[in-house]
Image (tube, helix red, strand yellow):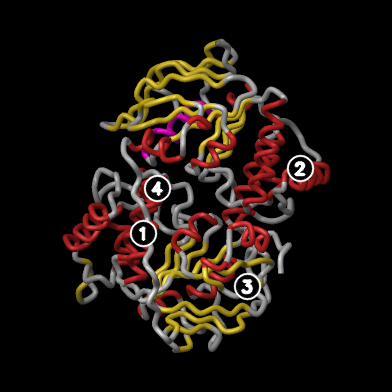
Amino acid sequence: MSYALELRAITKRYGATLANDAISFGVEAGAIHAVLGENGAGKSTLLKIIYGAQRADAGEVLWQGKPVHLPNPAAARRLGIGMVYQHFALFETVSVVDNIAVALDGRFDRPALSRRIRDLGERYGLPVDPGRLLHDLSVGERQRVEILRCLLQEPTLLILDEPTSVLTPQAAAMLFEVLRRLAAEGRSILYISHKLEEIRALCDRATILRAGRVSATVRPQEHTALELARLMIGASPPVVARTGAVTEPMPRLELRDVSTAHDARGTALRGVSLAVHGGEIVGIAGVSGSGQAALLDCVTGQTPGLPSSVRLDGEPVGHWGPGARRARGLAFVPEERLGCGAVPDMTLAQNGLLTGYRTGVVRRGLVRAAAVRRFAEGIIERFGVRCSGPTARAAALSGGNLQKFIVGREIGASPRVLVVAQPTWGVDVAAAAFLRQSLIDLSRRGTAVLVVSEELDELFEICDRIAVMFAGQLSTAVPAAATDRDAVGLRMAGVAA
């Protein structure tokens, strides 16, 4: 069979860890080919090898039937391979148009390129302002920049890593149509996602990795999502169980008509009110950039000057900073794991200390090293974090394992209020189920949990009430059982009352 891309016995080792073990498969021209696997199964390493960001220890890559050497991403792009990373490869201090220009060859006309970005964004349902600075953009908006930058290069093979994680169902459907059109034109697409129904709907074939090896190559449409999950993890995934909420009468967290003039990401809040009670999970849905970042800043203390608008257990805390709110029992899991949720070059033990210092690991101002280590070991064991131990660097963990550690760290503080942004973004099915169950269990022990997520299935699975944010405004939170995915998706797009 003739392949656009073929891998033969690709092997990569990091110290004692065998990340890729003689992986072989091919991607046909005009096909949408999925790569599935748990976090830590070797997907990211394999993609980096294909894109020239890593070098294999053994094996070969064939491009259109011929062996090729890919020393760096520039060489891959010259061949016609484009990639959109799950963790973005963008420059924080320059504009969208400058970030895109970096990936294009030769000189560029800034106004003309800006117009192309706007036109492409409108065509594919991925709007972005070319003049905005990257550090002003939310995670979802940055992903749009990555996708547009890749599409502007007109690649022959497009590698997409979790591309729909920040899209509404309607926008995801539009992206699928774009991908099908690209495939019909003869382009190949290598598609990575943990959304198994999405894989079944979109992809022609799927190669499944388990522990660094190919466990199967299948046609997704011929298998159920449960069967695909079993191939990925070697067993049936855990089932999330949500019992009825028993809430306290007084809100643990309350926002009263919060408005902001602006925020760093360009969206102002307009009269936002919200109450979260102990014993329940309230979810906030919305397309990235709709005001969620400003809302989280107000709740966690990043936006000062709101003395009576934000309350914890009835006490005004709008003028308090993040540290004072943490001391009052508010914990926070940010959407950006590396750099915000964890310091990449620090060990897990050190990262545990960052917010877990109130758990008894510090005594009379002195850090108790043994206690810090035990705290980290407890998180690793309880949350099934795959790593070499508490001395492992945060940057060495897969996205899903780092997320489990961060969530475990915050839950380990026994918070009265837990605020979580994108709890399972890019996390495999087993880890996602575990994290969701952990949030449910925490809420049923009396904690008030606020979840901000663009994953609608997740919100309906774990939330007792759901509100929708659009253009800085927040709808009334309604019982999850009283609405559905389509209605929420339309609200996210601003086309429903």
Rate crowding at label 3 as few (under 14), some (14 to 19) or many (20 or more) other CA atoms within 10 Å: some
Q: Measure the C-alpha gap from mark 4 to mark 1.
A: 21 Å
Do the residues bearing badges 2 and 1 touch, measured as CB atoms within 8 Å?
no
Mark positioned earlier in the residue sequence (3 or 1)? 1
The answer for how far apart the CA atoms under marks 3 and 1 are is 27 Å
For this orientation, the residue located farthest to the left is 370
Residue corresponding to mark 1: 241
Residue topped by disc 4:
400
Mark 2 highlights which residue? 120
Q: For the residues labelled 3 and 4, say whether their Cβ atoms are less than 8 Å apart.
A: no
Of the pair 247 and 272, the residue shown nearer to us: 247
Q: Is residue 187 above or below residue 85?
A: above
Is 493 on the left-hand or right-hand side of 47? right
**Whole-percent x and y of residue 261?**
68, 76
What is the x, y in percent for residue 16?
A: 26, 31
Amino acid type, callout 4 = Gly
Query: Residue drawn 68% across and 42% down?
Result: 148
- Disc number placed over residue 195 in the picture, else none: none
